Image: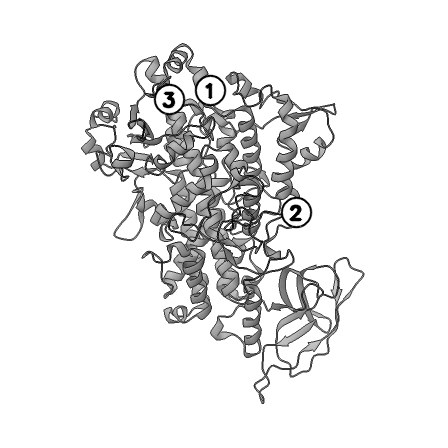
Amino acid sequence: MELVSSEVDAKTGLEKPRVTAFAHKTLREGHYEAEFKVPASFGPVGAVLLENEHHKEIFIREIKLVTGSDSSTAVTFGCNSWVHSKFDNPEKRIFFTLKSYLPSDTPKGLEDLRKKDLQALRGDGHGERKASERVYDYDVYNDLGDPDKNPAHQRPVLGGSKRYPYPRRCRTGRPRTRKDPEAEVRHGHNYVPRDEQFSEVKQLTFGATTLRSGLHALLPAIRPMLIKRELRFPHFPAIDDLYSDGIPLPAQTGLGAIRSIVPRVVKLVEDTTEHVLRFELPDMIERDRFSWFKDEEFARQTIAGLNPLCIQLLTEFPIRSKLDPEVYGPAESAITKEILEKHMSGGAAMTVEQALAAKRLFILDYHDVFLPYVHRVRELPDTTLYGSRTVFFLTDLGTLMPLAIELVRPKSPTQPQWKRVFTHGPDATDAWLWKLAKAHVVTHDTGYHQLVSHWLRTHCCVEPYIIAANRQLSRLHPVYRLLHPHFRYTMEINALAREALINADGIIEESFWPGRYAVELSSAAYGATWQFDTEALPNDLVKRGLAVRRDDGELELTIKDYPYAHDGLMVWNTIRQWAADYVNVYYKSDEAVAADPELKAFWDEVRNVGHGDKKDEPWWPVLDTRDSLAETLTTIMWVTSGHHSAVNFGQYHFGGYFPNRPTTIRKSMPVEEEAGRDEEMKKFLKQPETTLLDMLPTQMQAIRVMTTLDILSSHSPDEEYMGELAEPSWLEEPMVKAAFEKFGGRMKEIEGFIDECNNNPELRNRCGAGIVPYELLKPFSKPGVTGRGIPNSISI
């Protein structure tokens, strides 16, 4: 160990000689001790350097310097870091004091070390990374395919081109494949810097173990039990059996181990040694087993479900596509004034013009984003796709009512465009066609939710912030220390996603309708829709027409009872206040923000490298005032916490009963004009329920998705929630400590406000017969699948 003074020698202006000692193991488990003789003129200790002489890495939680035996004056260095063996890397590790400093305020004795530590974290951009390293660097997504193993597993490189714009990921430096010189070889685990890896507690409850081992062991065990496993469920009671009797599993070794990984899915039959695959009944089905079939629940979930980020105010009529009619067919929607006016009710009859003026028409629009993929997806086995538009009416009671669904197949070299509008008609045939059309729309929403609202907008877009922060903001920087808890485990979970979820033939491709085009589709959405400024919740709501900014700057919601927006704005405003309080402690003026070289380097790198495919966009904020910095930090913290929680921790609650959110639809509408559809229509007229079951995922697809959603919806026992625990460096600064206590208190108040709303019968989108209360933005939770809780970071 070496102690470094914060001061320089007054005469020479050079760093004072360091004080060195060896730390030895003590009788106390996990404790080392060293004794230093420090000269009286040494000054405050600003950093400690460590050299690990073991042959293995060692985890250092903290270092405490005690003068004499007076522990009340102990100086603590918070480390929480793995220190490599000197035999792997001769460079000593640097740990700084808990006191935060802007670059211009850095004590003279620490200036060189501050620069040296950042240089070590950046690496040199060459060579393959080793598991023990802590180097942060960028690369494109060129490791999802595996063309050497299977030519069908070739996937386009995402990022670095106009055709496939995408955020950057962490560079691993692996060699290129033989078949495709653009693609990176997939072997072993994906590298992430050592301190980004899961804790032991987290590894036991999630991670490589759960997704890889759990599913890879579980699915082969189930296969023999499912007769003709790729067939659909024979009837709805067979789906219900998954939650009651379950599927008996064959006697085999290893089921006990699988049960320890997915205990909510694989259960031991009471008083026996037999195992059964049985799922927990999701809350919404437990409350009302027919809710998924109802129009009002279909509409309610667009504002209080798993993907409340896509509904928009309808502002123009007739509805027109922005796609090229030469390629896709006529641009104008088949949804007419007459169709909407026939189904609108809300007291007096309204015209479309009146409803538009009163802001009572809303749209879920998956037309332009999906239409270019329709023919390609239809070439995949047992999969179909349309572009879709769904129009809703805001009733006098503040609830939404679906009016019409339009499904569109674009023209092709052999067929004209086909489109049809479905409404909840007065006869049995129309009523059933409406139910089938709803199933298509919900499947579109499920795919968009998983690939864009969830994966792209949280996991994927946050990784560049993490890499840039580690490369450009010193561990001493107050902004680094504010953001650090919001980045915990994200790089590791993203690396696991590239290994088992979003890779070629991974869980997403196997289970969701876009198949091999899944991640490519998220690239198209990134290019067309992603903007940093509208990742801020207030700006997103205004952009979608779901809120207007009043003269006093406050937001007014277009749908007053919009649970995601209402609760989200409470959380957003609380984070915004905390960020502003924190920024104002360290930056005494706007000029100080503009003059911070590390902050500028961080933000330049986010824009020009991490999100380099969008670097020339005009909407990037400039960090030149305290206000712009607080707003930018709030946006990053909101995306990692509130936004991610809203789209992640309800996945099992809403998707655990898969007919509510099918991940794929295997059959087109029976009324679609296409050769050979007559038999489908006859079958539909005779037994419409059979047609619906034919459309839904197969038994194997459903079980794979339900198991995955159960794992992804779960909180780890070591989860860290927003406002719960202060970072050690925040406690060092009294004004920051006070601001954090205010922040934590406000988060606890939000819990109470949400409970009140969920018990208010006037708020019909969150309180009513059989309705699941909206709790996804309640800040705190116990471990497990709870459907609530806002962790600091994207850790699952």
Residue closer to the observer: 747 or 420: 420
Decide which of tag 3 and tag 1 comes sooner along the chain. 3
In the figure, residue 118 lies in which quadrant? bottom right
Q: Would you say 319 lies left or right of 46 here?
A: left
Identified by mark 3, the residue type is Met
Decide: few, some or many residues near mark 3? Use Cα within 10 Å; few <14, some 14-19, many ≥20.
Answer: many
The mark closer to the camera, 1 or 2, is 1
Kindly identify which residue carries mark 1.
Answer: 694
Q: Residue 552 carries which label?
A: none
Q: Residue at x 49, y 40 (%)?
A: 648
In the rendered view of the protein, which quadrant contains the N terminus?
A: bottom right
Kindly identify which residue carries mark 2.
Answer: 201
Residue 38 versus residue 125 in the image, above or below = below
Residue closer to the observer: 500 or 555: 500
In the rendered image, the residue lying farthest to the right is 27
Q: What element carries label 3?
A: loop
In the figure, residue 785 lies in which quadrant? top right
How far apart marks 2 and 3 lie (CA) works out to: 48 Å
The mark closer to the camera, 2 or 3, is 3
The x and y percentages for residue 225 are: 64, 21
Residue closer to the observer: 184 or 654: 184
Identified by mark 2, the residue type is Val
Q: What element carries label 1?
A: helix
Decide which of tag 1 and tag 2 comes sooner along the chain. 2
In the rendered view of the protein, which quadrant contains the C terminus?
A: top right
In the figure, residue 336 lies in which quadrant? top left
Decide: few, some or many residues near mark 2? Use Cα within 10 Å; few <14, some 14-19, many ≥20.
Answer: few
The x and y percentages for residue 729 are: 56, 63
How far apart marks 3 and 1 lie (CA) works out to: 11 Å
Kindly identify which residue carries mark 3.
Answer: 669
How far apart marks 1 and 2 lie (CA) works out to: 42 Å
Q: Residue at x 33, y 56 (%)?
A: 617
